[in-house]
Amino acid sequence: MYEGKKLRVGIIGCGGIANGKHMPSLKQVEEVEMVAFCDLIIEKAEKAAKEYGIPGAAVYVDYKELLADETIDVVHVCTPNRAHSFITVDALDAGKHVMCEKPMAINSAEAKKMLEAAERNGKKLTIGYQNRQCADSQYLKLESSQGTFGDIYYARAMALRRRGVPTWGVFLSEEERGGGPLIDIATHSLDLTLWILNNYEPAYCVGKAFHALNNQTNVANAWGDWDPEKFTVEDSAFGFVVMKNGTVISVESSWALNTTKTDGSLLFCGTKAGADNMGRLSINGVRNGRRYEYHPDLSAGGVAFYDGIDDGDPSVIEAKQWIRSIIEDRDPCVLPKQAYVVTQILEGIYESSKTGDIYRFD
């Protein structure tokens, strides 16, 4: 259906993530032309159209007007989290394939609506977890799929910042974002962990979200002091997830935490070997009665796990893989049902924090 033609893409939300990731990446995909741009602030849409669009690219304030254009094949949803679900559902119902920026939605009920919309319309839906395309993630996935680690029974998904609170936009708004570092950055680490484990069956979890530092001032934050009155999301959150097969996953996240150990890393412990990417990728185990540790060289010679695309930039690889999945009518790297489970677990940690009790998954 799409072979030999350029896919016509519309961008909904022309803020930071669109300019920092989606539009520059799509610009490097030969089979794409960006034909429409929408933002509540018209100047942002106009600027994006001028920089990334085809000549005469359309500009909108109302996303439904963009969706009414039957010539648009694909939509990228790059709005604040609260709007992910209803815009994605409307786009799918309008006959568009959709790439939605992470997280999938602010809760599992909204994410389920997205799944159902994709299924009833026969359109592709994926979520922007580009970290799957990083070289170390690809390598860990290959090793895991080949059985190198045996049965992995313990994993850690870490996304810790010492003082890295984003003070721009609506990042600090509970209403717009649905949460803080847990839903913003730990969502990437959790997605990678489940993907490498190939395990999407959580049994129960416990968790705790903290508002321990967000009322402080003069805090040496990387992006300047935050306004305590506007800081309504957690500053850190931690969870412990037990999967149906007995595997346990520790989830650790913070935007502000009194620690020097900042991390955006993973750890896996299996019956045959273990691995982590804290600092550099490390594989460890015992061979011939001796402990070993090795660090694969990821600088050259590797082939991406998906499609053999290896441009070095995970966001560009993600964009190329996504567009190719549409043209060739096959699954994208990130399946919506996988992202749905990530959303379920994040929601479970938040709910456990609110109730002080175990959260059990159906």
Image (tube, rainbow, N blue to C red):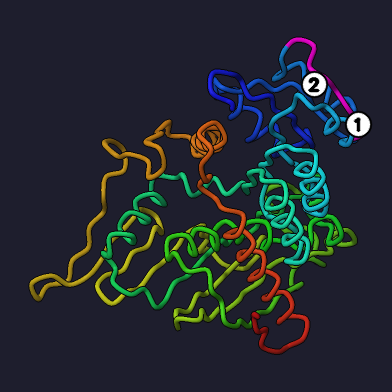
Question: Which amino acid type is shown beneath numbered disc 1?
Answer: Val
Confirm whether residue 161 shows in the render. Answer: no
Rendering coords of residue 355 (x, y %)? 77, 86
Mark number, residue 47: 2
Q: Nearer the viewer, mark 2 or mark 1?
A: 1
- 3D distance between C-alphas at marks 2 and 1: 13 Å
User: Residue pushed farthest left?
Assistant: 288
User: Residue pushed farthest bottom?
Assistant: 357
User: Relative to 240, is 98 on the left or the right?
Assistant: right
SS label for mark 1: loop
Which residue is located at x 74 percent, y 52 percent?
117
- Would you place residue 185 above or below residue 41 in this image? below
Question: Which amino acid type is shown beneath numbered disc 2?
Answer: Lys
Instruction: Return the residue nearer the eye: 34 or 50.
Output: 34
Which residue is located at x 44 percent, y 72 percent?
155
Which residue is located at x 71 percent, y 14 percent?
54
Instruction: Return the residue nearer the eye: 229 or 171.
Output: 171
Range of magenta residues = 55-62
User: Relative to 194, is 108 on the left or the right?
Assistant: right
Rendering coords of residue 89 (x, y %)? 79, 49
Mark number, residue 61: 1
SS label for mark 2: helix
